[in-house]
Amino acid sequence: MKKLTTFAAAAVMAITAGAASAEGLSTPNLSYRTGPFAATGIPLMNGQRDYMLMLNARDGGIGGVPIDFSECETGYSTEKGVECYEATKGEAIVTQPWSTGITLQVLPKTNVDQIPILAPGYGFSPMADGSVFNWAFNMPGSYWDAASMILNELGGNDLSTLAGKKIAFLHLDHPFGKEPLPFLEAMAEEHGFELLPIPVGLKEMQNQSAQWLQIRRERPDNVIMWGWGAMNAGALTEAVKTRYPMDQFVGVWWSGHDGDMEALGEAGKGYRSISYSAPQPDAAVMADIREYVFDKGDSLATESELDWVFYQRGLVISALLAEGIKTAQDNFGEGEISAAQLRWGLENLKLTDERLAEMGMTGMVAPFSTSCSNHTGHAGGWMLEWDGAKWVVGSDHLMADAETIRPLEVAAAAEYAEANAPWPIVDCE
Amino acid sequence: MEFLKSILITPFVDMATAPDFLLQVLWEGLVSGVLYALIALGFVLIFRSSRIFNFAQGIMVVFAALTLIGFHSLGIPAWISVIFTLGVMGLLAITIERVVLRPLVGQPDIILFMATIGVTLFLIGFGELIFGGESKRMITQELGMPTGSIDFEPFGGLLILQHIEIMSVTAAVILVASLLLFLNKTRMGRAVRALGDDPQAALSVGISLRTIWVLVWFLAGVIALVTGIFWGARAGGVDFALEIIAYKALPVLMLGGLESITGAIVGGIAIGLLENLFEIYWGQELLGGGTKTWFAYVLALFVLLFRPQGLFGEKIIERV
């Protein structure tokens, strides 16, 4: 019955999204609670939604202004995502596209419409270069950050040890899955390891026998997975079937879903997933979420979902947006901020340990700051490890190799600007 | 020269030097193929009896599997849940016949096809409302299905056969044999065939169109449930992404022919085997992999060039 009620609520929410906006700051989310990627999308969307509901219930919004958090259902379809962007941009002070494909499509539009894109941990990695991508933000980390941290972990913080090794890159054959390829190819060339890209088509997500036969034949030293939706469960099931050692199998932060791992149980022990967020069930913010949202029956999440990595990452994502809004309000001295003012706020975030403690989110994300030339924040992350029953933090705090990534980001951003000329460039100096 | 070698020589050398791996490739292809064939069988059964191309077969697989898991999650024993699920599929068949098909009797085929698209959209929305979008574990263990695998060491190598996969192939064989027996040896089965062969003649001898439609949609539901159980176990969970796999039935139908049960079986197994062989021995080396996304369609198109009715389809000659 709870399921029926929550989905009815979600359906109503999806229908009302795009309609005349309620009072407050409009922060639409281009969500996906339906379709092939819903299983992984739902806990994230629930976390995002609950955090905003909590702020509204506890504090009356941000700076006294309520948050109008609406959802527009995309089903993870790029076409529908663009439609949702167009439908919601009128009153919006931000757009949250929730897919690398949608992000790439709306990137040029946001320049014209002057609405910041917030794509935490996804989108186009060169968005880090704020001089080119003035309206786009992907803090606290990019896909290239994730790839760099994974390689560092595999190489024991010395990438020269990877020379002569073979690393398979199992990825969704989609803009999201291909995004880290330029970085990984550059690293393979520089450090002398063999990169073996293995694409998984959307229609093959749940039938990956051919991909895992290739892995069995090639015997790579490691498999890095860039999977999403049903692809993750399919890959993990095949890995167990093929008897690929789980401790040599690492996924990006979207390939570490509690739901997938619970189905696998003990068989998935040792599998790791890099993560820019760490679940903290005892964090102070969780008590507020329970008090102001969950216990009142306003959440769409289930009890067990509250401790999931994806749900808590959803909280972090909304917290980043809320912090951007607060930064802008404090700077401009007004509650009803504009999209341009939020852009400034997102570009001047200072998320320190002290501030995280005030927010009740200590340990849920690492401290970081943004600037005009750094829209990613490069907060680093942790390697989460499945212990057979739950995710545990399996590493110290890790950082991406900024010295290597930065020139690649700048070069790729410049290339994008040239290919899309005339493209506005901002001087960050 | 090197290119020709990689097409004409290297793959066969690879097959010969690692025959255990070749056997594994063939086994995996066979299992996929059998499961494709099961989905295609649902299409064929309905098309044979009513000339309706049932676009909803894919979502029926998801709906049946989620209904089974849903009943079990309420604390109902697994096999009782199977019976309840069959009841739901029966109810669905009656509803579709009464609400969707009966008012459209006599309408052009394309109208009926569009109606099945409507059924698909309804089942997606209704299913998501009832079951949610989260992935759910198939209750294979609760159904008493074996886990684990058997290892063989052919030619000094390794061949792994999962128990669940052996069971899925066995179940498919039993299901197909039962269907063939039903269609060829029972009065009702012959009525289904008669309706497909000549609806006017069948109606004139008292065969009930409504009863047969309910029956074939129910049988398609039974096939959907069996397919959902085994695909769900293979895919690591059941969610609405499983519907995408149904698209693989389309090239199977193009290859095997829309009316033929034999065609669905042969087409499914052929596509399962060939797409796996092509991907492993040619696609990954020459095209960077990912060929399974399109290989089956290209193969089906190639067959259509020479046999537009598919390998086992009936050649239709219409005289004006």
Image (cartoon, rainbow, N blue to C red):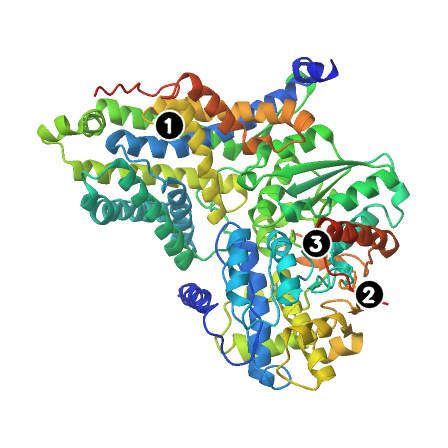
User: Which chain is indicated by disc 3?
Assistant: A
State how far apart marks 1 and 2 are (Cα).
71 Å
Which residue position holds label 3? Answer: A124
State how far apart marks 3 and 2 are (Cα).
20 Å
Nearest to viewer (mark 1 / mark 2): 2
Which residue position holds label 1? Answer: B174
Which image quarter holds the C terminus of chain A? bottom right
Question: Going by the image, does A11 lie left or right of A229?
Answer: left
Disc on the earlier residue, 3 or 2? 3
Nearest to viewer (mark 3 / mark 1): 3
Callout 1 amino acid: Ile
Residue A196 % position (x, y): 74, 35
Callout 2 amino acid: Asp
Q: Residues within 10 Å of mark 1 (few under 14, many from 20)?
A: few
Residue B19 % position (x, y): 65, 17
Q: Is residue A266 above or below residue B172?
A: below
Q: In the image, what residue occupies the spot 40% across and 45% down?
A: B59
Which image quarter holds the N terminus of chain A? bottom left
Can residue A283 be seen here?
no
Out of A373 and A109, give the one closest to the viewer: A109
Which residue position holds label 2? Answer: A427
Q: Quadrant of residue A288?
A: bottom right
User: Which chain is indicated by disc 2?
Assistant: A
Q: Is residue A56 above or below residue B250?
A: below
Out of A88 and A378, give the one closest to the viewer: A88
